[in-house]
Image (tube, rainbow, N blue to C red):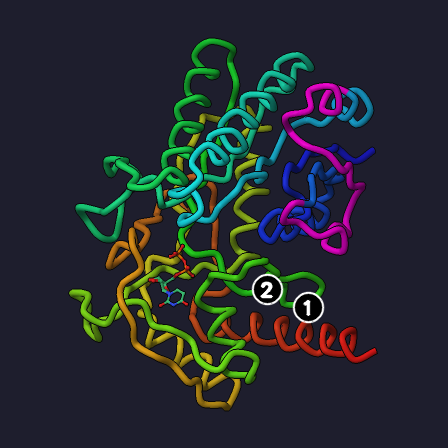
Amino acid sequence: MKETVLVTGGAGYIGSHACKALARAGFLPVSVDNLTHGHEWAVKWGPLVKGDIHDSGLLGQVFETFKPVAVLHFAAFAYVGESVVDPGKYYWNNVAGTVSLLEAMRRYRCSRIVFSSTCATYGIPEAVPIPEGHVQRPINPYGRSKLMIEDILRDFHDAYGLRYASLRYFNAAGADPDGEIGEDHEPETHLIPLVIRAALGYLPFVEIFGTDYPTPDGTAVRDYIHVTDLAEVHVLALQHLLEGRENVCLNLGTGRGHSVLEVIRAVEEAAVQPVPFRKTQRRAGDPPVLVAGSVQATERLGWQPRFTDLRSIVKTALLWHSGRILLNKEKVQG
Ligand code: UDP
């Protein structure tokens, strides 16, 4: 019989790709998602339990019914700007929700968790590429909520023996190469989907937030990691914990940075369309450069990313977004 893994936020962008990777590796992913931002259509590789991680009764039923061997924890709000204007929402959902989940795990003796953390826990880096041992000084409530959870996992390890992997993502991008799932945020604030919309004529232009950064072309640099590669590390981290090995905190990126203008050029090349853009002010809270120093994921988990260049990441995203746009257009017309 397949081992079951509970996936909170399994209907979301990264969670759904992780479900596919889990199924490929022989696990049964059981998703718990309140569908605030997730999509029912994205849950394809196992059952979906609609509900909230604050609901301890519901979590109890899930643990009793499915007896998961571990948890992959994605459920969280992740809009930096919103976290600044409404921090309560972030601490309640991300931090208190996680405590509710951890308490349920404790009640049902489920002691392994892979946690979706973020490079936003580092704040403005003092060194780039950012090593895992870099000081964590987040500059917004979103980053702080994730860092608090990393600390809580440590405390639960010390006190109750919880085993954890905290995976600090850089910029997740791209879509399932088979086209089964992909990114669909509402509202969409991420660079690559917005550039694609502008390339396909569904946005009049994309804004470039800041052209006066201390970077080669003046625009901000990020480390874009393909969502399928990201999903696969979750399975490796899970297997690592199931083998009884040590807790890990790992950066997940490619170790290569790309500027906003480079992303625009890559989309232009893939779409064979010019991308109209406007230069505007920096977005508050955006560090100039975020690039992962990520050797540990390779050294400790044997991870080898498959999509190592920006062009292949952008291509999978373009394929997905073109399909979604066509589908939605048909819906509107039909
Ligand atoms: N960005 C931009 N225009 C946009 C959206 C994003 O210039 O419409 C820039 C943003 O300032 C950052 C990079 O693109 O430097 C990636 O932003 P995104 O929101 O995709 O991810 P983040 O790095 O904020 O997690």
Asked if residue 28 lies left or right of residue 314, the reply is: right
The circle drawn on residue 315 is none
Closer to the camera, 130 or 38? 38
Circle 2 Cα neighbour tier, 10 Å, few/some/many (<14 / 14–19 / ≥20): many
At horizontal 33% and vertical 41% (from top left) the residue drawn is: 140
Q: Verify whether residue 197 appears in magenta.
A: no
Circle 1 Cα neighbour tier, 10 Å, few/some/many (<14 / 14–19 / ≥20): few
Closer to the camera, 331 or 12? 331
The circle drawn on residue 175 is 2
In the picture shown, does residue 165 fall above or below 25? above
At horizontal 73% and vertical 34% (from top left) the residue drawn is: 51
Q: State the image coordinates of residue 203 (x, y, percent, origin top left).
A: 52, 78
For mark 1, give the secondary structure.
loop
Q: State the image coordinates of residue 120 (x, y, percent, origin top left).
A: 35, 44
- Are dots 1 and 2 in contact, CB under 8 Å? yes
Closer to the camera, 86 or 296? 86
Asked if residue 214 lies left or right of residue 81, the reply is: left
What are the residue bounds of the magenta stretch?
36-60
Give the residue number, with chain letter if any, for mark 1. Answer: 179
How many angstroms separate mark 1 from mark 2 (CA)?
Answer: 7 Å
Asked if residue 321 lies left or right of residue 256, the reply is: right
For mark 2, give the secondary structure.
loop
